[in-house]
Image (cartoon, helix red, strand yellow):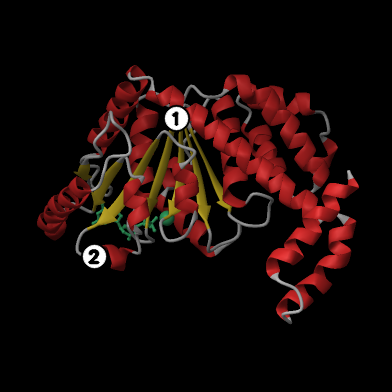
Amino acid sequence: MALSMLKDPQEYVEGVLSQDRLLLARTITLIESTLPAHQELAKNIVNQLLPYTGKGVRLGITGVPGAGKSTYIESFGTMLTEMDHRIAVLAIDPSSTRSGGSILGDKTRMEKLAVNSRAFIRPSPSSGTLGGVGRKTRETMLVCEAAGYDVVMIETVGVGQSETTVASMVDFFLVLMIAGAGDELQGIKKGVLEVADAIVINKADGDNLIRAEMAQKEYQAALHMLMPASPNWNPPVLTCSSTEHKGIDKIWETILDHKNKLTEAGEMAEKRKGQALDWMSFLLDEGLRQWFYTNPHVVKILPQLQQDTADGLISPAAAADSLLAHLNNKK
Ligand SMILES: Nc1nc2c(ncn2[C@@H]2O[C@H](COP(=O)(O)OP(=O)(O)O)[C@@H](O)[C@H]2O)c(=O)[nH]1
Ligand SMILES: [Mg+2]
C-alpha cells in the first residue's frame, strides 16, 4: 500500500509544511491508524510539526442533526476563504464510518467548499483508535495548522460525548440551534450550553424569521441564568441564515472579538496551556490503563477475580487491591 512505501517521517513533515494536500491526508491517515508502527511514525511527525502550530483560530461547531451545521460551514467557510483565510473542516460523525452515508450528504451540502483550493475537508471516524475522538482530532487539528490552515473547524453532532471533548480543544465553541424545538427536542444537554462561547439560531429566514428571533430572546434569558465560564466573555445569542448567507459575517466578528478580549486579558494563552496539560494527563491515564490491562499477570488473574467478585467471594475493593498490590511488588 502507498502508505507503507513512505517510511521517513521527514517526507511527511516537509510535505505538510509545503502544504501538499496528499501528504497532509496521508499524515492524518497515519494518525487515525491503529497499527503501532503507524502510530509511532505519526507521533514523530506531529512532534516535529508542533513548532509550526498554534497560530490559527480553533473553532468547535456543534448542533443536532438537521440544525444546519454543514450548510453553515459551507456559507461561513466560503466567506472566510474569500477573506483569504485557509480553512480546515474536521467532521466527527459518531453514526458513520468513513464511507458512511451522512458524509455523502455533507459533501452535497459543502459542494463549494469541497472543490475550494483554500479549504480542506476531512471526515473523522469517531471510533476505532486509542483515545477516540480526542486523540485523532487534536493531532489532526495540529497537523492542519502546520499545513497553513489558519481557521480549523471541528464539527460534531451535539448528542453524544464528543462535544465536550471538542469544547476542550478549541478556542471558541459555537452551538448551532434552530427555533421551535425545546432543548429536549434538540437533544442538547445543559452541559453543552455551559461550554458555549456563542449560541447561533440558524434558519432565521422566511417564515421562520420571527420564531428565530423569539428563540434568540429565550436563549438570551436562559444564558443569563448561567455563570459565564470566562470573566472576560459573555456568550452572545445570534441569529443567521446559512442558506441566505445572512448574519454570517457577524459571527466571524464575534469570534475575533472573543479572541482579542481573551488574548489581551492573557486568558487565551492560559486556556491553551491548560488544554495541553489536560491532554497530557489524559494520555497518561490512558497509557497507564493500557499498561495495566495488558500486563500478563493481570490478564491471567483478572477473569477469576471478576468471577469471585461477582459471586460475592471477595469484596470489589479487596479484588482491586490485590491486583494493584501485585504490580507494586513486581517492580
Ligand atoms: N431555511 C433554511 N434552511 C436551512 C438553513 N441551513 C440549513 N438548512 C436546511 O436544513 C437541512 C439540514 O441542513 P444540514 O446542513 O445538512 O444540517 P446538519 O445535519 O446539522 O449538518 C437542509 O435541508 C438544509 O438545506 C438555513 O439557514 N435556512
Ligand atoms: Mg451535516
Find residue 139 and name its label: none
| Residue at 45% in and 23% down | 269
Residue 303, above or below 86: below
Tell me the mark number nearer the camera, choosing from 1 and 2: 1
* Crowd class of label 2 (few under 14; some 14 to 19; many from 20; radius 10 Å): few
Residue 82 falls in which quadrant of the image?
top left
Quadrant in the rendering for residue 183: bottom left
Q: Residue at x 22, y 45 (%)?
A: 240
Viewer-nearest residue: 12 or 41: 41
Determine if the C-beta at disc 1 is less than 8 A from ligand 1. Answer: no
Q: Quadrant of ligand 1?
A: bottom left
Residue type at the position of mark 1 = Lys
Residue beneath disc 2: 181
Above or below, 241 against 178 in this view is: above
Left or right relative to 320: residue 207: left
Label number found at residue 271: 1
Residue 182 image point, x, y percent: 24, 65
Q: Is residue 289 left or right of residue 140?
A: right
Where's residue 20, x and y in %? 63, 28
Residue sitting at x 71%, y 78% = 310
- Which residue is rendered at x = 24% and y = 47% of the image? 226
Spot occupied by residue 280 in the image (x, y as percentages of width and height) = 62, 36
Residue 32 seen in render: no
Name the outermost residue toward the bottom: 311
Q: Please say if 181 is above or below 2.
A: below
Classify mark 2 as within 8 Å of ligand 1 or not, answering yes or no.
no
